[in-house]
């Protein structure tokens, strides 16, 4: 481990500890919403994402719904998105992304954000798998989530290396955080092993979805949270314009659009995607996930089904 990496890990440990301390202070002051239902209680939700807008695109409505129902949400952002612009410098972008991520988190009701600060697109080089999995396991043991959200490590055709890296590290960390012999130095420090009950993976294709969430009441929040990511929404419109130009096709409204006037395009696209998922399950707007829960114990409890939180 290089000196630089030791410094990075040390800094991140402090960041996590500070975030947890803040959350514990917040938790003491929060009222417990009523009613939660017969088996329900306030749960902790932990989202691992590669880039600052992954959660909003894939699960923004669901996260807003969890938060609205009184559950506690923590977001971990692995990279600083410092390559995601055609018009800003990397330094300008990092500053903008920090502001945008926190703005969106506020819209959705996310209570704390932990930014690990790795460089966009280079996560696998900067944080090899074992290092990233260990960091994620530390965060899990600190935050003690019931539910972990992340990219799906087993989905085909995932083109972004940061998504693949976060997906596998988060899945393995969530699967093994309750084993005391994984990362034993964390346990020696006093961090208790922790069992994660459910893993929710962002699902891109219909065949991957086994859990749907009705987000009809939260579609506006999802769109508003995405629009907080100004630099990335501008980038998205510019990307569409590059593709349009290269294709030779004729879509005048898109060709003539000022990328900074992105709101209408985002609104239209987000509603179209959520409406399509909704058609699969009978809701007006929905998000879908591949979910695993309780390690298959349900097979031994025939006829019983745990309550759904959302
Ligand atoms: Zn991403």
Image (tube, grey):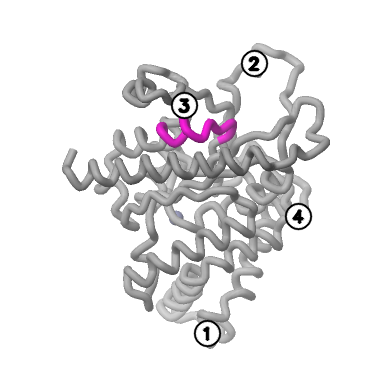
Real-space CA distance between mark 2 and mark 4, rounded to the nearest whole angstrom: 32 Å
Residue at 45% across / 43% down in the picture? 18
Q: Dot 3: within a 10 Å radius of its alpha carbon, few (fewer than 14), some, or many (20 or more) residues?
A: some
Q: Is residue 225 left or right of residue 182?
A: right
Q: Are marks 1 and 4 in contact (CB under 8 Å)?
A: no
Real-space CA distance between mark 3 and mark 1, rounded to the nearest whole angstrom: 45 Å
Residue at 69% across / 34% down in the picture? 42
Q: Are marks 2 and 3 in contact (CB under 8 Å)?
A: no
Residue with the mark numbered 2: 299
> Which numbered disc, 3 or 1, marks the residue that appears first in the sequence?
3
Q: Between residues 29 and 69, which one lies in front from this camera angle?
A: 29
> Which numbered disc, 1 or 4, marks the residue that appears first in the sequence?
4
Residue with the mark numbered 1: 258
Q: Dot 4: within a 10 Å radius of its alpha carbon, few (fewer than 14), some, or many (20 or more) residues?
A: some
Residue with the mark numbered 3: 175
The percent coordinates of residue 216 (x first, y second) are: 76, 55
Q: Residue furthest left?
A: 2
Q: Between residues 175 and 253, which one lies in front from this camera angle?
A: 175
Residue at 25% across / 48% down in the picture? 125
Q: Quadrant of ligand 1?
A: bottom left
> Which numbered disc, 1 or 2, marks the residue that appears first in the sequence?
1
Element carrying mark 4: helix
Q: Between residues 131 and 303, which one lies in front from this camera angle?
A: 131
> Which numbered disc, 4 or 3, marks the residue that appears first in the sequence?
3
Residue at 60% across / 27% down in the picture? 293
Q: Which mark is residue 216?
A: 4
């Amino acid at each position: 481990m290089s000196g630089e990496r030791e410094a990075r890990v040390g800094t991140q440990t402090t960041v996590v500890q500070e975030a947890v301390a803040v959350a514990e202070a917040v938790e003491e002051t929060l009222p417990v919403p009523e009613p939660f239902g017969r088996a329900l209680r306030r749960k902790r939700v932990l989202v691992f994402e590669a880039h600052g807008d992954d959660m909003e695109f894939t699960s923004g409505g669901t996260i807003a719904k969890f938060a609205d129902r009184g559950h506690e949400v923590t977001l971990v952002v692995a990279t600083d998105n410092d390559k995601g612009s055609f018009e800003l410098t990397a330094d300008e972008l990092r500053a903008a992304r920090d502001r945008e991520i926190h703005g969106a988190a506020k819209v959705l009701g996310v209570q704390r954000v932990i930014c690990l600060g790795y460089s966009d697109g280079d996560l696998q080089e900067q944080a090899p798998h074992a290092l990233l999995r260990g960091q994620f396991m530390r965060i899990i043991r600190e935050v003690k989530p019931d539910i972990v959200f992340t990219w799906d490590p087993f989905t085909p055709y995932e083109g972004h290396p940061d998504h693949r890296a976060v997906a596998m590290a988060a899945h393995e960390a969530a699967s093994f955080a309750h084993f005391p012999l994984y990362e034993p130095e964390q346990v020696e420090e006093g961090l208790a092993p922790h069992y994660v009950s459910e893993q929710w993976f962002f699902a891109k294709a219909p065949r991957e979805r086994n859990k749907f969430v009705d987000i009809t009441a939260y579609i506006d929040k999802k769109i508003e949270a995405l629009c907080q990511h100004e630099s990335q929404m501008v980038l998205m419109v510019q990307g569409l314009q590059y593709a349009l130009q290269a294709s030779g096709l004729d879509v005048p409204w898109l060709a003539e659009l000022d990328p900074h006037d992105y709101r209408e395009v985002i609104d239209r696209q987000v509603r179209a995607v959520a409406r399509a998922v909704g058609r699969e399950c009978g809701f007006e707007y929905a998000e879908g996930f591949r979910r695993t829960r309780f390690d298959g114990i349900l097979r031994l409890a025939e006829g019983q089904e745990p309550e759904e939180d959302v």
